[in-house]
Every structure is written in structure tokens, then in C-alpha cells.
Image (spheres, grey):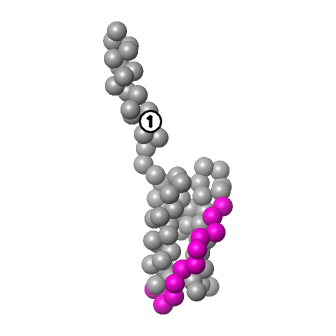
Amino acid sequence: MRLVLALVLLLPLAACGGGKPIPPEALESGDGSVAYRYGGADGAAADRLAMLYCANLGRQRSAAEVTREGEHRVARYRCL
């Protein structure tokens, strides 16, 4: 009975996916382009960082070109 109770209490924690998403890490920048590596499926944080990077250049960011590298994704942007 205690085992069943423990499983019922711990099951929601296992469904959380094991922790927080990995924040974007800048890989390269310059020449009007920037790339970020991030974990998880949500690239919204990388999109925001690229938007700010390009805004500092007085430009707008392009749509991301996203590739997978193992468990991570790499999003590359150009500042137009």
C-alpha cells in the first residue's frame, strides 16, 4: 500500500520532463548573423535574443534556420 501511495505521489514529478529548459547559449555572432544553442523544443528565448541582437545593429532578424545537434537545437539568424 505504501508503495502505491509513493508511486501516486511521485508520478506527477516524473511527467515534468526532468527539469528546466536549457537557456540559449550564443555560439557565434558577427557579420550580421548570430546563432544560439538551446535545449527543448521551444526556441522563443533564442528568437528574443536574436531580435535584440539585430535591433542593436538597427536591423530586423530573419526567420530561424533550426538544426538538431543531439539533444540540443541550434538556431541561426541573419540580421536583414
| Left-right relation of 49 to 2 | right
User: On the image, numbered disc 1 is attached to which residue?
Assistant: 15
Magenta part of the protein: which range? 56-67
- Residue 33 visible in the snapshot: no
Give, as a three-letter code, the residue at label 1: Ala
Give the residue displayed 60% in from the left and 58% down from the top. 73
- Residue 20 visible in the snapshot: yes
Residue 38 in magenta?
A: no
Instruction: Estimate the x, y position of residue 45 in percent, counting from the top left.
Output: 45, 65
| Left-right relation of 13 to 36 | left
In the rendered image, the residue lying farthest to the bottom is 58
Instruction: Estimate the x, y position of residue 5 in percent, counting from the top left.
Output: 33, 17
Instruction: State the quadrant of the N terminus.
Output: top left
Give the residue displayed 52% in from the left and 84% down from the top. 60
Which corner quadrant of the image does residue 12 belong to? top left
Residue 57 in magenta?
A: yes
The front one of 17 and 33 is 17
Give the residue displayed 51% in from the left and 88% down from the top. 59
Give the residue displayed 47% in from the left and 40% down from the top. 17
Instruction: Estimate the x, y position of residue 41 in percent, counting from the top left.
Output: 54, 54
Give the main secondary structure of the magenta stretch: loop
